Amino acid sequence: MAEAHDLKVIGTRPVRPDGVEKVTGRANFGADLQLPGMIHGKVLRSPYAHARIKSVDVSGALAMEGVLAAVSRSDFPEETDDLGRNVIARDKVLYHGHAVAAVAATTQLLAEQALDAIKVDYDVLAPVLSIDQAIADGATLVNEQMHTNGDASQPASNIAAITKFERGDPEKGFAEADVVVEGEFRVPMAHQGYIEPHACTATINEEGKITVWCSTQGHFDVRTQTAAILGTSISKIKVIASEIGGGFGGKLSVYLEPLAVKLSELSNRPVRMVMNREEVFRATGPTSATWCKAKVAAKKDGTITAATAWLAYEAGAFPGAPVGPGCMSVLAPYDLENFSIEGIDVLVNKPKVAAYRAPGAPQAMHAMECVIDDLARELGMDPIDLRLKNAADEGTQAPYGPKFPAIGLKACLEAAKAHPNYTAPVPEGCGRGVACGFWFNIGMQSSAEVLIREDGTVIINEGSPDIGGSRASMCLMAAETLGIPYDRINAHVADTESTGYCNMTGGSRTTFATGMAVVQACEDIIAQCKERAAMTWDIDADQVDWDDGQAVPKPGVNADVDPLSLADIARTWGRTGGPILGRASVNAQGAGAGFSVNWTDLAVDRETGKVDVKAYTAIQDAGRAIHPAYVEGQMQGGAAQGLGWALNEEYIYDDNGVMENAGFLDYRVPVASDLPMIDTQIVEVPNPTHPYGVRGVGETPITAPLAATSNAVRDALGFRVSELPMSPPRLLEAIDSQEG
Amino acid sequence: MGDYAYAAPTSLEEALSVLESQANDGQRTQILAGGTDVLVQMRSVDKEPRTLVDIKHIAETNELSIGADEIFIGAAIPSAALNENDELKGLLPGLIEAADLIGSTQIQGRATIGGNLCNSSPAGDTIPALVVVSAVCVIASPGGSREVAVGDFVTGVGQNCLASNEILLGLKIPRPRNNSADAYLRFIPRTEMDIAVAGAGVALTLDDGGTCTSARVAIGAVAPTVRLVEAASAALVGTKVDDDALSAASAACSDAASPITDKRGTVEYRKKVVGVLCKRAGGIARDRASS
């Protein structure tokens, strides 16, 4: 692997290629496509959180002038999976806002009005609205056919699955300890907060060929999911990813696309569907509300002897809460001999959860990092010293199985201890809270083609929708590999028929895995260029080197020739075998875990319960920062989202399961003035499996802020508030009850 | 957005006649000043057709005057023009800070105090601030003009006494005497871009010795309409507006509040916080009046 000091382009901070169009508004997002004859689709949504559908009659809508199509469950194959049942309700509606029917009309307003003409007959059922209700004896069942872990010998249950990790003997560890600390914590459902609502346009031609334009993190997944729900072949569907206005995991599942395709088929028109903000909140995936218990024990010197965690996650209406990743993450920062972790995936009558940035980790790590903080307090140890004493390192066996290769947790902790923001005393009237963050990161499948223009400039075709500046990162890695300037390369996010298969942009995999494919495709180009040069010089290809963007004879090779640049080789390729294109595909292994340390200083207004965040610092191991400004942006963004979740964000439901704050006015993400400057420090412990040492950096940043904020409030108030968000009314109530 | 027609009359007479003729035809009209509430509502919740009558091209609604006895703020004056007027900020710092709390800088280029008042939300920030400085609404009617105290203008949640053939021309405010000042504070969980969970305005006059000779205290977002809290005023008059007096005024505000529990806060929370805001705003008004 190249050492940092050998790198010429990686580590610089050029302007991203998609930046200007996004700033000027010229970029095309999901709702921007206009096609001749295009009409507008809208969804009829359930007014109940739980009800049996007796009948759906769309004929009233179809009778309206200008309404060109209407669909309901009977228009889709009966055999389907949970995703299909989420896109259009079948026997039951399972949450308020669940799609029941859809119409397409010549105007948006007409489509909205047509929804009123659809008749749905419901048998209303009692909703299950919390983990406590769902797991209570005799609870109403969200899905009468569901058995825990698929074990039909047991009665049906709202618990879809139980996950367990265990090692050593936790009881023995607790018995040996000098100090035992435990706590119980609740974290609310939270929205990813992407600004662009879900949107798509679909059209189908006379031969049955479907084209879908949409805002997505994975257009290949849209193709797979849409084909499955419609009961058609993926070969019939082309998906084009628009620019995307944020996703954070929320744009990995389809909601509208199969409906738009069906409406297009029935109306013989292109159909556009755009959710409003309220629909985004009511009917698309947030992340789980959780109830977590954590317990940890240590010797007087700080050696942790045992830890246990019990994690209950709301899945929403269908199985699939991110409790598995929660179990993987909850103790990942620590090198432990004795632990047990149990997680349960619980159905409730709320929208099906979706991924949200390190899905499942922030909630579980909040619980454990709060308890670790309490342990430090009990032991009278600095919270960073306690973590250093027990920190996972190269060779530590992760709680979920594998041994860590080189990781950067200790480097982050050491950097925190030495950081001026940490050595500075806590400001008067403030509390300080520290927490560790972790995300395992993933690799998966990516493809890349590198095309050379006849002037020697370069096009990268790949299939990862660009959310966080990945086109810039691809161009940087290609420029470094090829030895040419950044501005001679374009990266293009190609549609499903114009590049090789690619998994979604998620799991912090893009710069790692798609980057690996791009680097290998550039190496393919270099190999071919060496052959062309060898042909031109009439020597063997293994006598040619690629040095600083040029083919040169190897030292000692007797050839009196000038070096050949990519442009030189392109100019004469007609004589050496024709155009040059490189390609590579990977199923990337060894993503390399990401660790972080965060801390914040904040003050609490004891008369109003309002928290004023004064300072925030995030330190994270990036492996190698390809574009440091975008790594810092990820760290700052994760801190902002985490602070919002810790302090104000929550889904508020009434007793009927109707969300009361389905908009950004009352679902309070932080605004810029709510936040201090978020200081960042990138640590680089290169990932040995990536050609440039990259680790995923997108998700780790949200895993520490919840606990860092909780721990700072604990420090400021002198007592712990164990339920998030620590909104002003909740904090004031806690303060008042403490003060009696 | 629903269908709408747009009229931009250039005189008061023309504006009143548009309202009258539409009413006679049974057509709905809505007055448009900055549109920062109206346009959002038309796009989201109320898509029924209507005629928008833009009052920004009428001389009377664009008047901003600071006289020896009286200040007049036309209903079409955007709050940015108030925020940037140093003389006005010196005279009515509380009202101007209330206006400055509403919306972002861009929104303030359009938003008006008159519009905030006509929207008649229980949480409208300028309404308590207007009440404590004894502002009066100047209303143009077909038969002439009439005046209504701001405290009497709003009649319920989203409701006011403006008839469908009338236009709010502006607000008339007595010029504050020497040793007088106002202050307004609201509570929101964020730092901006939010709606008041509770709000409190205080206007005071002190004598040369620093004793309060008159006081008006009004609270917002804790009842269907703004409440002028006489007991809080009484707790301040005759005192040096010290901590004890402010605590008494604060308790009076908490007592006077009759809020609801909703997604923005509980009854208990709002009652407590409105008292805290009264105490803090009272302190600010006192310091301003004595400086």
Image (cartoon, grey):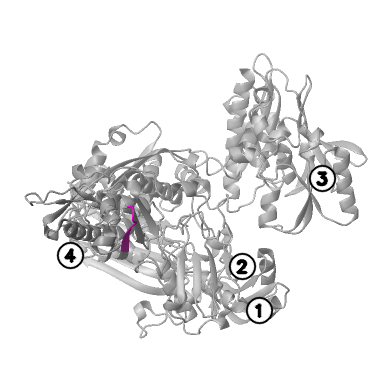
Q: Chain of mark 3?
A: B
- Outermost residue to the top: B208
Instruction: Magenta stretch: give its range.
Output: A448-455
Residue assigned mark 4: A168
The answer to whether marks 4 and 2 mark residues whose Cβ atoms lie closer than 8 Å is: no
Question: How far is the residue under mark 1 from the one under mark 3?
Answer: 44 Å
Q: Amino acid at mark 4?
A: Gly
Vertical order, A82 against A385 (above or below): below
Residue with the mark numbered 2: A38
Marker disc for residue B287: none
Residue B256 image position (x, y, % from top left): 68, 41
Nearer to us in this view, A330 or A69: A69
Residue annotated with mark 3: B161
Q: CA distance from mark 1 to mark 2?
A: 21 Å
Does B203 appear above or below A667? above
Chain letter, disc 1 residue:
A
Q: Chain of mark 2?
A: A
> Is the residue marked by circle 2 packed among few (<14), some (14-19), or many (20+) residues within 10 Å?
many
Q: CA distance from mark 4 to mark 2?
A: 63 Å
